[in-house]
Amino acid sequence: MALGSLLPELQPGGAGRVPLIERVARWAREKPDAPAWTFVDYSLDPSGVKITLTWAEAARRARAMAARLRQVAEPGDRAALLLPQTLDYMMTMLGAMHAHVVAVPLFSPDLPGHADRLIGAYADSEPAVVVTCRGSLPHVEKFLADHDVPRPREIVFAEEVDPALADTWTDEPIGFDDLAYLQYTSGSTRRPAGVEITHGNVTANATQLWAGWAPDRPTPELVSWLPLFHDMGLIAAMALPLYDGDHVIYTDPVSFVMNPLRWLELISERPGRNVYTAGPNFAYEYAASVVTPDKLAELDLSGLVTCLNGAEPIRTSTLETFAEAFAPAGLRPGAQAPGYGLAEATVFVSAAADDAPPKVIEVDRDALTQGRVVPADPAAGGERASALVSCGRPVGQLVAIVDPETRTERPDGEVGEIWVHGPNTAPGYWRNSERSQDTFGGELAEPGDLPAGPWMRTGDYGVVHEGELYVTGRIKDLIIVDGRNHYPQDIEVTTQEAHPAIRPDHVAAFAVQGEETELLVVVAERNRRVPLARLDLAEVETAVRGAINVEHEMSVHDFLLIEPGGVSRTSSGKIARAATRQRYLDGALPTTRARLDARG
């Protein structure tokens, strides 16, 4: 079953065939004094210091950066962004895109938790230039000295680029097929790879996302804390303002983690505006878990039009918890918009942004393990049901549900691999032709009215039901025991609900190979709210094994309770099951039993 259609304005000759980066100059001419980007710096003041660039200022700084980069790099060279998330970061991205220098959006090496990703992405891209700031220089120098990575020809300090260089820059033609930047994947199932994002991809996806969010209200604004080195954060904060000349207010991820209510406070500060935002599932759960009645009374979320929820399996409990927590602050029932996307599609594929509460269907779990969506029997009381959240419909692109073996479409209601075709799909991975062909070279065996190819194979299982897309899980994460398919996220939910000593949304379920079939392993983080002195490991393990046996009719080969922070996560906050599995096999997980033994 296929969904979607292509946007006429993105076809050859269409009005949208102007590279997005060229609109910087347009908005600088048409609205020079209007705000373009505002960065909120909480490191200067806990209440936040707002620093704003107008469109005229942004255009001048971007052109100055373009001129500076071309002093030290040739078109096609890579420039690695190893600097904190500030206005300088955004201006560096725009400058590189002007200059035909291929940006590699990364981060300062002192950002915790992403060292392996930084090493892999930096080494793979072989940058000629590093762009950083003086404050990050010691971390950059240590990173270059400690690892076997290429030395850059030059280190450029973003805050020291002279704005007067803008006067020396002459715009150059930019083609839709020209490479804009390398978006390194988050590595949830394998090592990071650089997705080649062209100027055409960025232009198309900005158009699609804007159409999907349907911001037909005046003076829309975007509020974000998402990392700019991640696909959703970059496209939300960069492409949307470029598309229509609107205002973005953003901060950095660490400021959000330190106080997630800052995100909602920034939204609340925009009375009379129509605000859009986005975040992964865990962010909504996190914000709802820390809000207090006093803080809630200070918030006004009535201006929040759409909050896109994506980047990982969307839990129905999160949708309900967030809606209930912030309804008293004016959050509309239709504001939450579950969506689906991935770096290989630039980011955005589909969203349920119809100003209606998220659509959730209860399906028979046994039928789902066999690849079919069948409504659950209400008489069963939900014991044999799985909840699936609609991710809406694709915008400006085509989505097909395909049998990955036969390359034929699956009918409505049958699970298959999600394939995507559209101007937003990347041409390939950087210097990896074999993997590029495997991912981006999909061909339908019986295309019918659809294009035969090329289709981008997402590696995700999904299903179309009543005209909407539902994502059921990663193909590589699928657990197959005794010939039955089990989705790890279902097992993880069962696990976290089995005992209060398990930390919610910090569970990884995966398979290891046995002699005759795959074996289930469950790794769960300890909930800090249960004191170690009162923890009974045997009781927790018995509860988990029993719940999984009853709910999923399968046995647990091994269960590990580990210390908080022990489950690996990707840059977007998803559970990195493959990485956790490898650490399990290596015996490298910080088990709670070892912690208890050490205490004596």
Image (tube, rainbow, N blue to C red):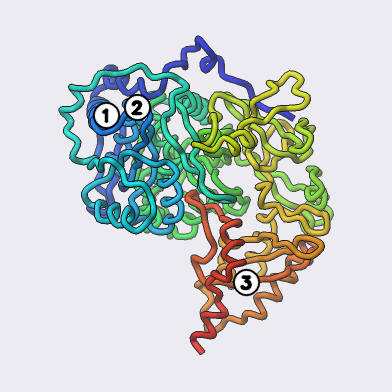
- Residue 259 x/y as whole percent: 38, 57
Disc ID at residue 560: 3
Density class for disc 1 (Cα within 10 Å; few <14, some 14-19, many ≥20) is some
In the displayed structure, does residue 277 sit left or right of residue 432? left
In the image, 474: left or right of 152?
A: right
Kind of residue indicated by mark 1: Arg
* Left or right position of 213 against 483: left
How many marks the image carries: the answer is: 3
The reply, left or right, for residue 564 in relation to residue 513 is left
Q: Name the foreground residue: 22 vs 43.
A: 22
Between the C-alphas of marks 2 and 3, the distance is 51 Å
Q: Earlier in the sequence, mark 2 or mark 3?
A: 2
Q: Nearer the viewer, residue 372 or 512?
A: 512
Q: Does any portion of residue 215 appear in the rendered image?
A: no
Q: Is residue 422 above or below residue 11?
A: below
Question: Could you tell which of marks 3 and 1 lies nearer the N-terminus?
Answer: 1
Q: Nearer the viewer, mark 3 or mark 1?
A: 1
Tag 2 residue: 75
Q: Amino acid at mark 3?
A: Leu
